[in-house]
Amino acid sequence: MIESLIQADTQIIDKKHSGKFISNLIYDVTHITNLLSNGILNLFKDSVTLIGLLFVMFFQNWKLALISIVMIPLASLFAKTLGKRIGKVTTEAQEKSGFLTSYLVELFKNHKLIKIFQKEKYEKNRAHDHLNELKEKNKKIQTVFVRMSPIMETLTGFMIAILIFYSGKLMAQDELEINNFFSFLAAMMLAYQPVRALSNLNMVISQGLSAANRILPIVDNENLIQDASNAKGLLVNEGKIIFKNVSFYYEKNEDEVLKGINLEFLGGKMTSLVGLSGSGKSTILNLIPRFYDAQSGDIKIDDQSIYESKIKSLRSNISLVSQETTLFDDTIMNNIRYAKLNATDEEVVAAARLSHCEEFINNMPEKYETLIGENGVRLSGGEKQRISIARAMMKQSPIILLDEATSSLDADTEFKIQNALKILTENKTTIVIAHRLSTILNSNNIYVIDKGKVVADGKHDELMIKSEVYKNFYDKQIQK
Amino acid sequence: MERTKIYKRLYHDYSKKFLDKILLSAFFSVLVAGSTSAIAWLLDPAIKKLFIDKDQTLIIFIPLMIIFAFATKGVSLYLAKSYMISVAEEVK
């Protein structure tokens, strides 16, 4: 399942809360492994034991044996009813477990927000609500499991009572010997254990099957974004990217985010995308590495359609430095090396030096071996950005997609980041969602995007004269 | 932390408030034990009177007592487990 999730389309991951996937991985997978390990073993062991004991019972007295096996269909009937119930309650419990896990993920992520708004009590109540719902479902599951005990015990009591009654009658008529009776009784009492176990097993199977019912669609989910049958390896020379009549929407019932857009990004040059939030700039970046596929139009890199190129070769030519820096809870060395796992320590140090990371890394107690915590919690915003730039440098790809951070940093850090970005993007095809004047001024071309369309393009000075949208954006949004 | 300290902490912080349910569960567990022993105990007159002496006077009574013992065991087991399940879930 993890493999399926790693390879899943971005759209599939985006649609569901990460907590629900975690719940699937923990809750459902446990039920399935329980079914496949204990379930199958017990099914085989108990079935064979039951068959052997039934043979002994029929061998000793077929009439008594016939009376005794009445219990098996009765037990199966109860087990089937409870099995259905357990399947339904397990599904409900998994749903609640998903809600709780999603809630917990958000609780940890937003703990500072909770503190500053003093919502501890409110969150405690919400946590209690989620927990209580899950507790109720868990209680139900376990209660359904133990509900089999009184049924099976009473059935056993009835069968032994009938056996004793009927055997007493047979013995009084000298039709049954005491040795046959004891052998039969021993076989029957031993046979009830596998019958009970098999009845419980039915519930384990129902639990496992309902879990599999939720997991298998995730595992079987066929990626919509995959290599075309005639896909070829992408060869990037100049690095020129062209968008031709590209239209895109995230959901069928939603408006188009990009409406037949035409763009041209010159190879080895920097092009900026500017526009208000929600205008479609990030979508343009997401279409290039095929995180999403456009519904119509084509995107070409050096005259090769990205839809006819192998995804692996396409993505190997692209680096992404996003606004929200994503780092792993690992050492600095491993975080930078993530782009090129076989890189030597010297290569990592060189990238760190170029991106102005070395100065703060050397001040750390373990230097490159310092663990940075979850998403680099032990680093400042500027330090995290520089590590992500160093990571992108390691990839040495000819195309750079850059979503510039909107937050301001101190002048010194800002200078270092701009310097690192300059080295990273030098002679590379760079598409940047720009928020800084320096970036805009360094751009070879600027596209002004508004409501999924290109409303103007050109250099900064030209746009200030000819585009009202750009002028408005420049006045309000650009950090000068 | 020492084991005894952990036990004490678990008892004081989590189990003590459910003592009534725990005691009820213990009571039903005693019933489970009693009814299980009763089943074995009932086999003695069943074998001696019905099978050796071939005396038919207890042929209805003993099977009824066996049904009663098994039913008591089943219901007690269910109640004992249900109470403990509810305690375990409340502790979460």
Image (cartoon, coloured by chain):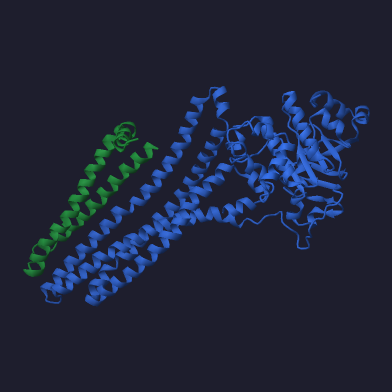
**Colour chain A is painted in:** blue
Asked where in the image residue B4 lies, by quadrant, the reply is: top left
> Viewer-proximal residue, A364 or A451?
A364
- Asked if residue B15 shows in the view, the reply is no
Position in image of residue A229 (x %, y %):
76, 63
- Asked if residue A306 shows in the view, the reply is yes
Position in image of residue A292 (x %, y %):
73, 48
Position in image of residue A477 (x %, y %):
79, 26
Indicate whether A297 appears above or below A177.
above
Query: Which residue lies at the image location 43% right of the left edge and 37% below the top edge?
Result: A132
The quarter of the picture where the N terminus of chain B appears is top left
> Viewer-proximal residue, B81 or B7?
B7
Query: Which residue lies at the image location 83% right of the left edge and 43% below the top edge?
Result: A428
**Colour chain B is painted in:** green
| Picture mark count | 0
Asked where in the image residue B91 lies, by quadrant, the reply is: top left
The quarter of the picture where the C terminus of chain B appears is top left
> Viewer-proximal residue, A95 or A431?
A431
Position in image of residue A66 (x %, y %):
27, 72
Indicate whether A70 appears above or below A466.
below
> Viewer-proximal residue, A480 or A180?
A480
Indicate whether A243 appears above or below A277.
below
For this view, does A244 lie left or right of residue A325?
right
For this view, does A120 lie left or right of residue A168?
right
For this view, does A135 lie left or right of residue B71?
right
Query: Which residue lies at the image location 89% right of the left edge and 35% below the top edge?
Result: A456
